[in-house]
Amino acid sequence: SAPITAMTGNLPVAVGFGNGLGAPGGFVIATIVLSIFSVGFVALARHITAAGAFYTFVSRAWSKVPGLAAGVMPMVTYMTMEAGLVGIFSAFADQAFTTQFGLDLPWEIYAVVGLVAIAALSHFDISVAAKVLGVVLVCEIG
């Protein structure tokens, strides 16, 4: 749900520090792998309707121990990714406010504002966050 953020955050790293000109091939391979994964995920979701996606699927297929690992791995990944997103948000917010308004604040202020916004949206019902995400996504693409 954040195509521009994903490309501005990942593409420079993939090209500059990754496989250089082969970066588009990496995106093609990732698209193929995720497409195959999504077919299986949707097929499982039709039969297993409990919450917990990875944990539930793996626990039912094997047992609770690998299911727990399958549930914890995405959580750790999302937390790590969130730290990176707060960093990129802070850098771009600092650049935008300095360029547009001449307001030169430390990047930490923008990070705290972003974290407070995330905490507030996480506190309320998911429908509030979904509505905000919908508006922001339309603005981003527009």
Image (cartoon, rainbow, N blue to C red):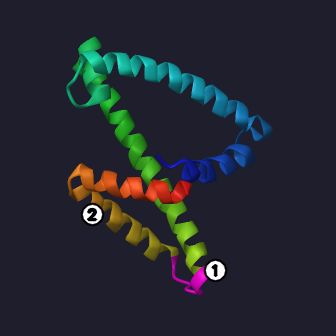
Q: Residue 99: which disc? A: 1
Q: Can residue 118 be seen in this view?
A: yes
105 within the magenta span? yes
Q: Is mark 1 on a helix, strand or loop?
A: helix
Mark 2 sits on what residue? 120
Q: Which amino acid does label 2 sit on?
A: Ala
Q: Residue at x 59, y 29 (%)?
A: 30
- Measured from the top left, where is residue 133 in percent x and y? 39, 54
Position of 88 with respect to 47 (left or right) is right
Quarter location, residue 141? bottom right
User: Which range is magenta?
Assistant: 100-106
Going by the picture, which residue comes out furthest to the bottom?
Answer: 102
Q: Which amino acid does label 1 sit on?
A: Thr
Q: Residue 44: which disc? A: none
Label 1 neighbour load within 10 Å: few <14, some 14-19, many 20+: few
Frontmost residue, 127 versus 32 = 127
Quarter location, residue 118? bottom left
